[in-house]
Image: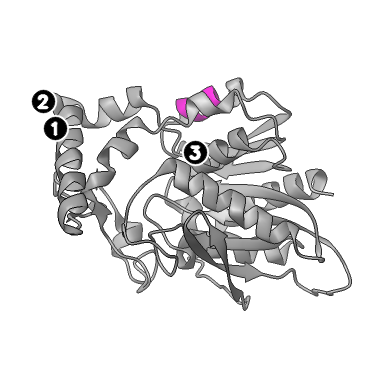
Amino acid sequence: MSQTLNAPNGAKPLTVSFSSGDGYVVGQLYLPEGYDYTKRYPAVAIGGSFNSVKEQMGGIYGAEMARRGIMALAIDYRNYGQSSGIMRQYEDADSKADDLLAALAYLKKRTDVSGTGLLGICSSAGSVLYAASKDPSVGAVATVAGSFFEPSITSMIYGADDGVAKKKEAGRKARERFEKTGELEFIPAYHYTDQAAANVGPMDYYMDPSRGGVPEWRNAMAVMSWANVLDFNSVEKASSVKSPTLIVHSDGSAFPDQARKVYDQLAGPKDLYWATGNHFDFYDQAPQVTDAADHVAEHFMATLK
């Protein structure tokens, strides 16, 4: 029987902030069990799903990493949650990559940290590939239930009746409006049936307050994000990633063939763990999360020394 996990799930994270780009990022730092400030620990920065905040799956995996002896920093990307940014709910792959690298820079400055790496869940699996392709000094990478999008996939999802072109035009007009007036236009990030939403379909995780529908999360996407969302291409970044990388995926997770495609193109040491479970199970359900966390922690322990 599955068990829903909730962040911080017994751990008491520290709230930290650090600069990134033209603003700042806020994160929750999970210290390893039995923490001793005189010792040094492997440390990872964690990003969650599209539109997520640190109190969702990022915090759950932060607590799981800490329980396994790894320091973990779950972050709110800029324009989300407690982090800075006037373009709220704005999706930008390059900005997210910069925030992840800023999180690593923060961790590297700590005297209690040895090596540093990145963990991405769902769409942040692509974000950590963007970051590692920018900075070859990233010590290690892991992804869980990655949504490895590229234009051919987004065209398949949104392309009916010139959907991609229409959404990009809506995004262009929304950006023009923002630049002229400072006003942001939003659509639901997730909805069961509303075709105007960014993601349409069974969304029980986000709609359930006991799971992903936490008070800190906002179910909205800035319309001017569309071009960035539709042009997102994590697959093309894979061939530039030389950091040791673990991909945890399943047949029930998003686009399993994309995970295999990314794995094949990775340039450095790599491992693929094929688990069992549906996509949202890997966000907060004990069998899937604990299994994934075991393998991810083992990967980081072996590579971040």
Asked whether residue 192 appears in the rendered view, the answer is no
Give the CA separation, mark 2 to mark 3: 27 Å
Of 262 and 257, nearer the camera is 262
Question: Which residue position is annotated with label 1?
Answer: 166
SS class, disc 2: helix
10 Å crowding of disc 2: few (<14), some (14-19), many (20+): few
Q: Read off the magenta span.
A: 257-262
- Whether residue 232 appears in magenta in the rendering, the answer is no
| Percent coordinates x, y for residue 295 in the rendering | 69, 47
10 Å crowding of disc 1: few (<14), some (14-19), many (20+): some
Say which residue appears at 88% left-offset and 68% top-offset: 39
Task: Note whether 122 is above or below 89 in the view shown.
Answer: above
Task: Note whether 295 is above or below 113 in the view shown.
Answer: above
Of 271 and 135, nearer the camera is 135
SS class, disc 3: helix
Instruction: Please name the amino acid that badge 3 sits on.
Output: Gly
10 Å crowding of disc 3: few (<14), some (14-19), many (20+): many
Q: Which label number is shown at residue 161?
A: 2
| Percent coordinates x, y for residue 3 in the rendering | 50, 65
Which mark sits nearer the N-terminus, 1 or 2? 2
Say which residue appears at 70% left-offset and 60% top-offset: 107
Say which residue appears at 56% left-offset and 73% top-offset: 8
Asked whether residue 212 appears in the rendered view, the answer is yes
- Magenta segment's dominant SS is helix
Q: Which label number is shown at residue 213?
A: none
Whether residue 286 sits left or right of residue 51 in the image: it is: right
Q: Which label number is shown at residue 126?
A: 3
**Label 1 close to label 3 by CB (< 8 Å):** no
